[in-house]
């Protein structure tokens, strides 16, 4: 009875208050990081800090955290999605479904399903996953593996519009959570492993009409085209855009990372290969680029530049700087002035790095090691980090109170040499010969990192690396999950483990926290899958059950 009343009540409130309870305005999105009663954006705010001002749950009482509901997603392919929450309703996506869930009880309200022609799934490199939705004015926006962006009515789950982005047969796919910025729905593509030419697109939230497309690899004659060989390399030049960008509404700039150049073999595409493995600062209304910074010119081994861009105001030499922080797969943590793209700091955050000895702050370019030079000359070398990077897609969190960045880092390398490669439609486009995959004993480490130095204040080593997102709170807590299923709370200042709960599968999801009627909740999806589960060959995960569920926790009282 209470459940039914709650759901009806939430919708009635929407009608009584105009459309305010159901319609999310652009102002709501701008304020998202300050309003703990809802979660409206990927990253829990346009700044993607994954920080909550909530402190009801804190270091003193987190041991009383208990589950209040679970919701089975029926998805055995990996639950990487970040939930959204509005008006007492949680929205959760998998690659095949979108769910609306009563946030108080965990009861399903509606679901929307997508069916795929099996042919569309041939060029999904790293897991049939989806990373979440975006929301604006009563509509929920999401992407599909077969290259569509769709809008659903938040009340009913009915499709409002569906727009094809491009042809999946070219190697494209979509797993990204869209970003709504300045009234435009922005979505990117995956596919640099199959020789696509990357792009980012903006859509009209009302109609689904395409407003702009920004190619990340220039055609001959366009700016940056002189950084490519004078042949057709640009046509399959990569630069995918598979992770969600962040947004500074005051500067009206979206910060979006681009993926590796194609093929992985760098010796066949001499030059910097702009605008791959870079961050682009983009005007959301038009898709115009205000500035760019390239993390890895002529990316040697699929470092990508897609990892999240976390925005914060940092004090440096008595000045407050509006920065962007980015822990790249290449092992460097970059701090960039987000008003103009100037590099302020770039330091290694991994324990072992052999590909570069540092980053020249004047030129912004990596200082290549002899190892990398030998590799570029065609030799087999031991490169650290390897393809999975110093950190993969799993988003870090930044706590403005501790000033620390909390990230699930990776410690892996490989013995690798360039190899001949020719582009074939819908075929893997690598061109490297891997002799051996290498890992440290602890393949992953949860690190609390000083952004300006890259040094860890504390570290929690993990034999099996974590591909879970991280969440931090004003309660001085850090939450993250493990692929063996544990969901854990740590002291944000010391890294001490304060609480842990064993979920039913492995966690590769993105925890969020929120508040309703004065009570704080923590939600995370558990459901193993994704790139490491598929390609990591880690026998320790053999007995982890597949099958996803969304878990919500609160203090027992
Ligand atoms: Ca909010
Ligand atoms: Ca890639």
Image: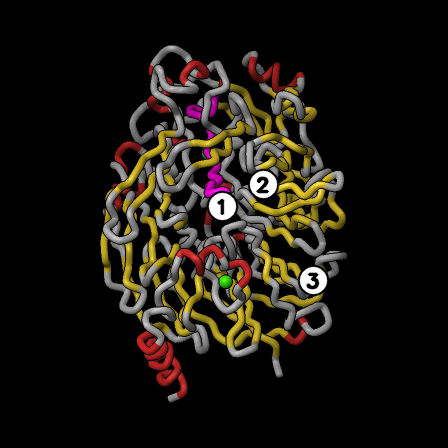
**Magenta span contains residue 78:** no
Spot occupied by residue 427 in the image (x, y as percentages of width and height): 34, 29
**In this rendering, the label closer to the viewer, 1 or 3:** 1
Could you say which disc has been placed on residue 324 in the image? Answer: 2
Q: Which residue is mark 3?
A: 476
- Name the front one of labels 2 and 3: 2
| Whether label 2 touches label 1, CB < 8 Å | yes
Closer-to-camera residue (144/400): 400
As drawn, is 290 to the left or to the right of 235? right
Q: Nearer the viewer, residue 397 or 81?
A: 397
Q: CA distance from mark 2 to mark 1?
A: 9 Å
Is residue 260 covered in magenta?
yes
Disc 1, SS: strand
In this view, 9 is above or below 307:
below
Region of the chain picked out in magenta, as a range: 247-265
- Main SS category, magenta section: loop
In terms of depth relative to the viewer, which is nearer, 544 or 232? 232
Tell me which residue sits at (47%, 39%) in the image: 256
Q: Quadrant of residue 26?
A: bottom left
- Quarter of the figure with residue 335: top right
Label 1, label 3: how far apart the Cα atoms are: 24 Å
Q: CA distance from mark 2 to mark 3?
A: 22 Å
Q: Residue at x 24, y 45 (%)?
A: 209
The answer to whether marks 1 and 3 mark residues whose Cβ atoms lie closer than 8 Å is no
């Amino acid at each position: 009875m209470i459940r039914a009343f709650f759901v009806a009540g939430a919708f009635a409130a929407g009608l009584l208050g105009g459309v305010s309870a159901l319609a999310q305005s652009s102002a709501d999105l701008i304020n998202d990081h300050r309003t703990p009663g809802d979660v409206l954006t990927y990253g829990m705010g346009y700044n993607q800090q994954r920080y909550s001002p909530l402190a009801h749950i804190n270091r003193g009482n987190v041991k009383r955290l208990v589950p209040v509901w679970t919701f089975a997603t029926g998805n055995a392919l990996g639950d990487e999605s970040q939930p959204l929450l509005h008006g007492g309703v949680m929205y959760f996506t998998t690659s095949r479904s979108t769910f609306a869930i009563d946030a108080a009880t965990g009861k399903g309200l509606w679901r929307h399903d997508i069916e795929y022609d099996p042919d569309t799934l041939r060029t999904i490199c790293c897991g049939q996953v989806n990373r979440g939705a975006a929301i604006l004015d009563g509509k929920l926006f999401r992407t599909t593996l077969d290259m569509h962006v769709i809008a659903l009515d938040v009340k009913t789950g009915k499709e409002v519009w569906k727009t094809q982005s491009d042809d999946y047969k070219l190697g494209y796919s979509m797993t990204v959570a869209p970003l709504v910025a300045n009234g435009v729905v922005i979505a990117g593509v995956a596919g640099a492993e199959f020789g696509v030419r990357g792009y980012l697109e903006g859509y009209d939230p009302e109609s689904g009409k395409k407003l702009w497309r920004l190619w990340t690899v220039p055609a001959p004659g366009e700016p940056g085209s002189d950084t490519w060989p004078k042949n057709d390399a640009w046509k399959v030049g990569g630069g995918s855009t598979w992770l969600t960008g962040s947004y500074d509404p005051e500067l009206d700039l979206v910060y979006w990372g681009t993926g590796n150049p194609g093929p992985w073999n760098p010796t066949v595409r001499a030059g910097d290969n702009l605008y791959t493995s870079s961050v682009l600062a983009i005007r959301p209304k038009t898709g115009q680029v205000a500035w760019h910074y390239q993390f890895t010119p002529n990316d040697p081994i699929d470092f990508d530049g897609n990892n999240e861009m976390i925005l914060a105001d940092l004090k440096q030499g008595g000045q407050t700087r509006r920065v962007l922080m980015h822990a790249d797969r290449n092992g460097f943590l970059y701090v960039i002035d987000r008003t103009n793209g100037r590099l302020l700091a770039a330091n290694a955050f991994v324990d072992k790095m052999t590909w570069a000895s540092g980053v020249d702050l004047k030129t912004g370019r990596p200082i290549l090691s002899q190892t990398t030079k030998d590799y570029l000359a065609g030799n087999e070398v031991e490169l650290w980090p390897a393809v999975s990077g110093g950190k993969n897609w799993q988003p870090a969190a930044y706590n403005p109170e501790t000033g620390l960045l909390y990230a699930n880092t990776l410690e892996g390398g490989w013995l690798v040499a360039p190899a001949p490669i020719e582009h074939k439609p819908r075929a893997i486009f690598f061109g490297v010969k891997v002799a051996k995959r290498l890992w440290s004993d602890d393949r992953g480490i949860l690190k609390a990192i000083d952004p300006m130095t890259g040094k860890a204040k504390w570290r929690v080593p993990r034999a099996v690396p974590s591909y879970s997102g991280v969440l931090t709170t004003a309660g001085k807590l850090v939450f993250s999950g493990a692929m063996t299923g544990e969901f854990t709370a740590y002291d944000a200042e010391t890294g001490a483990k304060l609480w842990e709960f064993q979920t039913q599968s492995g966690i590769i999801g993105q925890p969020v926290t929120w508040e309703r009627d004065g009570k704080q909740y923590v939600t995370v999806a558990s459901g193993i899958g994704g790139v490491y589960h598929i390609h990591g060959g880690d026998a320790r995960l053999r007995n982890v059950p597949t099958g996803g569920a969304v878990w919500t926790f609160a203090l027992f009282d």
